[in-house]
Image: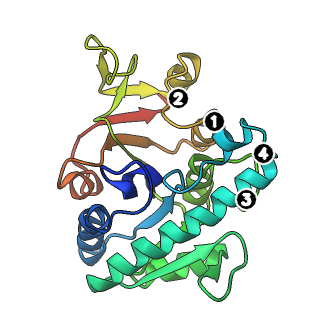
């Protein structure tokens, strides 16, 4: 299960979708799928609309979250297009029924798609407000019985503080779920981390923007930080 942030699709832009950025990620994902790995994706929508931040500005949180879910559909279709141009068979499955553009998310159907070698792109989060796409990734990972959650970020692992702001930030090679929660390290939101902890699902955090990293992590190479049960 690969969790891609919406911001990753914007590349070096402030917002929106940058086709060249998507092509880079899609190429690595397609290569993994063609190598015989079963790959599922959950994509955020922060490059188009961020529900939580906009609800803080006065918009109703539930309405803002639904708008964020619709943003993830747009991102999912963009990634699907890029993957299929590379000869990779895909299915977008939406937690919000939207038959004209995506299949409804049905667990057994998603598993069947994976068994047939298709990349499954899970869109619209969990389909419920107040839950992030991090939580959606954790939930879908449990349902689809994936080996791990791969969290693709802008940094090369988990640090004790923000490495973008502090030069003395220390990177963890591995860390437990409880430590990430107690230290509020923001690996994933607390609901997603707790769900992973309860089901002993490893979370691997790595730098998405270093070329080849997606391939390395799905092949089992040790990069980034692994969050585990200890």
Quadrant containing the N terminus in the rendered view: bottom left
In this orientation, does residue 50 appear? yes
Give the residue number, with chain letter if any, for mark 4: 59
Q: Please say if 34 is above or below 192.
A: below
Disc 4 element? loop
Checking the image for residue 66, the label placed there is: 3
Mark 2: which secondary structure? helix
User: Given contact means CB atoms under 8 Å apart, are the residues at marks 2 and 4 in contact?
Assistant: no
In this rendering, the answer to whether 22 lies above or below 213 is: below
Q: Position of residue 141 (x, y in %)?
A: 54, 57
Camera-side residue of 185 and 144 = 185
Q: SS of the residue at dot 3?
A: helix
Q: Nearer the viewer, mark 1 or mark 3?
A: 3
Of label 1 and label 3, which has the lower sequence position? 3
| Residue bearing mark 2 | 177
Residue 194 numbered mark, or none = 1
Compare marks 1 and 4 and give the one earlier in the sequence. Answer: 4
First in sequence: mark 2 or mark 4? 4
Give x and y (percent) for residue 217: 27, 51
Name the residue located 29 percent from the left edge and 62 percent from the top edge.
25
Check residue 54 in the rendering and tell me which mark sits there, or answer none. Answer: none
Task: Using the numbered discs, state the Cα–Cα distance from disc 3 to disc 2 in whole angstroms.
Answer: 29 Å
């Amino acid at each position: 299960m690969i969790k891609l942030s919406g911001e990753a699709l914007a590349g070096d832009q402030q917002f929106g979708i940058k086709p060249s950025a998507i092509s880079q990620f899609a190429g690595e994902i397609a290569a993994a799928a063609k190598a015989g790995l079963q790959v599922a994706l959950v994509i955020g929508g922060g490059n188009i609309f961020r529900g939580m931040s906009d609800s803080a500005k006065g918009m109703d949180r539930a309405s803002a979250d639904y708008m964020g879910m619709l943003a993830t559909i747009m991102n999912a279709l963009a990634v699907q297009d890029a993957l299929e141009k590379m000869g990779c068979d895909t299915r977008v499955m939406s937690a919000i029924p939207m038959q004209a553009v995506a299949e409804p998310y049905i667990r057994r159907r998603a598993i069947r798609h994976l068994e047939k070698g298709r990349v499954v792109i899970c869109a619209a989060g969990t389909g419920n407000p107040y839950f992030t796409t991090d939580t959606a990734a954790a939930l879908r990972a449990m349902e689809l019985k994936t080996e791990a959650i791969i969290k693709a970020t802008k940094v090369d692992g988990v640090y004790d503080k923000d490495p973008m702001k502090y030069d003395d930030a220390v990177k963890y090679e591995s860390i437990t779920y409880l430590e990430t929660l107690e230290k509020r390290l923001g690996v994933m939101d607390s609901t997603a981390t707790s769900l992973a902890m309860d089901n002993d699902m490893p979370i691997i955090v790595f730098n998405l923007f270093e070329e080849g990293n997606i391939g390395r992590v799905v092949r089992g190479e040790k990069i980034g930080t692994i969050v585990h049960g200890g």
